[in-house]
Image (cartoon, grey):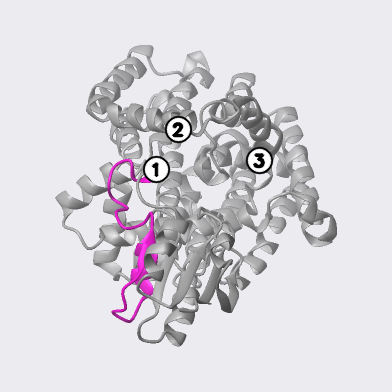
Amino acid sequence: MSSRAVQRLRGSGWLPLAVLAALALALRLVGLGAKSLWVDEAYAAGLMQMDIPELVRMSVSGSPHPPLAFLVIRLSAALFGTGEAGLRALSAIASALAVVPLASLVSRRLGKRAALCGGAAWALSPFAVSIGQEAWLYGITAFLGFLLLDVCDRAWHGSRRAAWAVVPLALSGMLVQHLFGLYVAAGFALYLTVPREDRAPLSRALVTAGSLALLYAPFAPLLLEQAGMRAERMRRAGMDMAAVYSHRYLFRLPTVYTRLIPDGLLVDPGGHLLGDLKQLAFWAFFGLLNVYLLVCLLLERGLRRPLKVWLVCVLAVPALLFIREDPTVRHLTLLWVPLCFAIAAAFRRWRPSGVLAVAGAAVMLLPYYNVKTFPYHRADWRGAVALVEDGLEAGEGILVVGQLSGGLAWDYYSVTDHSRTALWGEAPYAPNRLERGRTAEAAMDSMRRHHSRIWIVVNSWGGPPVDSLFRDAAVLLDRRVSPAMRVVHLSFGR
């Protein structure tokens, strides 16, 4: 970049934000291919072998998500290769660039320095780095969502150019993830936070909303069908909904908020935490930090009451979603908007507290880079496949228990042509695939007719328990490759 361009960038006030985005990208490129694919990434990797029409058709029939994210991953693979780093490259770039619209939105309300502090938390947090290092849709969703909110804010303040960008951005986001509708609703609700004297005509917002609804109408049945499938699954399972709601609101919902910065580095709460002082300290720190940040947000005098109401409504979204869904923090990147505002407000109220929030995010990067699996998924498929194939002998069977895309994860890392059986994972792109397939016991009975020794690869994140399969077998090996990956080698006497 020329010195004149640098001076122009510095004069516009964008240089610090450009540096922050560059830092965010560097942190996401560090070890981009180091962590093993997990099953949803393997699902995406399998689609990369298809032509574009087939990719769209198969992703729509076998995934709860629209196809645009998979097309972005396909572009990433075309540009950077089909290795782990290549599949994840565009997601990393999107997650890094997301800091620009996020900080830009905050800066117009709370100032550039405070916004940079809030944006730094996004750049440095294990949550944001992690979703940027996955060949999946969350990093892409965050970038499009933050950009949509920034553009909506400009449009409702009178920018005609920004108004023209609202519909294509909103439609693109909806074709990445159906939950992007939360961003769309938040973006249009921003109209009510603009002072009347500065607000664009109501007709502009109405025409924009109508145009978006018209263009999205052909895709709306996908959302309704997916919602119906989830409700039907719960009905068939015969769940006690009172217990479900109790678990969601007393257990799941608080963990979503607490994990906004550290993500899966905080292990699930339970009795085992009582003996883990480090995890207890992490839970307490981030829980109390979020409460403090919320207080700073509510007391911030630089924010008008309508915007505070808007931010509180954005924070309340998960409480409404849990009536029908069970989202994780990764589904709710929208929550980072009020969090960024809150960190900026804390910085304005007492600078050391804003810096402490950013430092807390940065410190948690150390354990994130030190674990060889994604903290949320804890699945080392690369290590599991290598362990089996290093000890595999002719005539032995392989049973992959990973639900949905476990067979694809095995195939991605396998370097032999040895056949394997993937429980529930032989047709991951088929519609209603959760209702298909055999039980683990039935699969094992079938394999025992042909093999006296069987390797079992179990992804316990989403896979069924398999201990019942060992009752009349000699266990030759039982190794936990990673917290959610187990490899068992069995011998059956004949």
> Residue at label 1?
144
Labels 1 and 2 touching (C-beta < 8 A): yes
Callout 3 environment at 10 Å: few (<14), some (14 to 19), or many (20+)?
A: many
Callout 1 environment at 10 Å: few (<14), some (14 to 19), or many (20+)?
A: many
> Residue at label 3?
257
Q: Which residues are magenta?
A: 406-434
Q: Nearer the viewer, mark 2 or mark 3?
A: 3
Tag 2's secondary structure?
Answer: helix
Relative vertical location of residue 241 with respect to residue 332 in this rendering, above or below: above
Q: Is residue 344 visible?
A: no
Instruction: Name the amino acid, label 1.
Output: Leu
Measuring 39% from the left and 43% from the top, which residue is drawn there? 144
Image quadrant of residue 417? bottom left
> Residue at label 2?
183
Name the one closer to the observer, 42 or 385: 385
In magenta segment, residue 171: no
